[in-house]
Image (cartoon, rainbow, N blue to C red):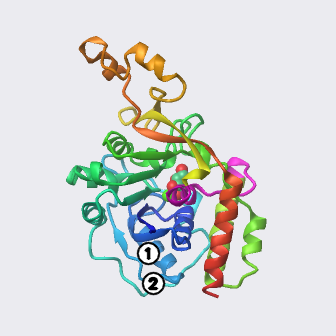
Amino acid sequence: MPRRIILDTDPGIDDALAILLALASPEVELAGITVTGGNCTLDDGVRNALGVVALTPAPATPVHAGVALPLLRPPFTAPETHGDSGLGYARLDPAPQPPAAEHAVDMIIREILAHPGEITLVAVAPLTNLALAVRKQPRIAELVGEVIIMGGAVSVDGNTTHQAEFNFFVDPHAAQIVLSSGMPITLVPWDITSKVLLTGAQVAQLRLIDSPITRFVAEATRFYIEFHELCFGFSGCSLNDPVALALAFAPELARTVPMHIAVEHASELTAGRTVVGYAGSTALPPSAHDMLGWDTGRWPHGWSRVHRPAANAQVVVEFDSERFVAIFLERITQLARGTN
Ligand code: BDR
Ligand code: CA
């Protein structure tokens, strides 16, 4: 049975590629796309999601507008990375389908309550929609099946400041709410996704199929590749958001380690920094945890629980990039062949 997924986005070029991958993957039943402000404004993001969906064989996939602004911080968009419209050089026709009437936050809550334990939330944007959903209906924390988050920089500099990756930087308060919510979280950080590259040559190969999808991918990624080459010296662009989506149907691509993850939200200097604790990770054998009293509560006055919180996320530390890129290209090719 396919996994029922909600894809929370800020489209965004790699968000758009994640939408295409979701709609090209038979293991996935896409309940809907939710949108928040991030790479571009909320209005642009909704228009982009609708435009991308309209290119595919599933043009009626619902797109739910969510929260426009971060919880406390001012909005911070990324036109240098994704272009003024959010989709690089691509220009899509206005979609025939309007956005869904239901707010993204309410859609997330309704879906999780209606399908207890079955929904996979793939969040590839600032976590504003998820934070407000769990604040509005805290029961979703225990009823959601899994939350896969693209965000954070665990052991490398961030891509937005030295301290912070974009999704955590834009709304660190929301990220901290979600990370501390008790939801079952898999985190795929920039450390991993930045190295998963789509090259110009691979895009040119895709473009041999003449389809609205390959035309879109080529025009959007031309801008994205130029940015990655200029800014990071990469030969290609990072498939950040598609990597998170793939973990919903191919978790074997990743090796994860349990860690405690928090997000710095009080300091301007380090806003959005991923704060990592290896408690619960394989860094120490279980016997050492027991000896130290970390998991047993043997320390007096709850000291160990205050200072050594248990793991709250499975963090991706290795990823089979080659295999993933092959799957990605194969599926986009199939999707394009079906629409040319
Ligand atoms: C993340 O930030 C955005 O620019 C991308 O869409 C991705 O979700 C990478 O840091
Ligand atoms: Ca994104």
Which mark is first along the chain, 1 or 2?
1
Q: Which residue is mark 2?
A: 95
User: Real-space Cα distance between discs 2 and 1?
Assistant: 8 Å
Task: Give the amino acid at mark 1.
Answer: Arg
Secondary structure beneath label 1: helix
Residue drawn at the location 48% of the way across and 73% of the way down: 48
- In the image, residue 324 above or below residue 296: below
Using the image, tell me which numbered label, if any, was put on residue 116.
Answer: none
Query: Residue 241 location in percent, x, y?
Result: 54, 58
Q: Residues within 10 Å of mark 2 (few under 14, many from 20)?
A: some
Secondary structure beneath label 2: loop
- Can residue 149 be seen here? The reply is yes
Let me know if residue 249 is in the magenta part: yes
Marks 2 and 1 in Cβ contact (< 8 Å): yes
Q: Which residue is mark 1?
A: 47
Give the residues in magenta. 230-250
- In the image, residue 99 above or below residue 185: below
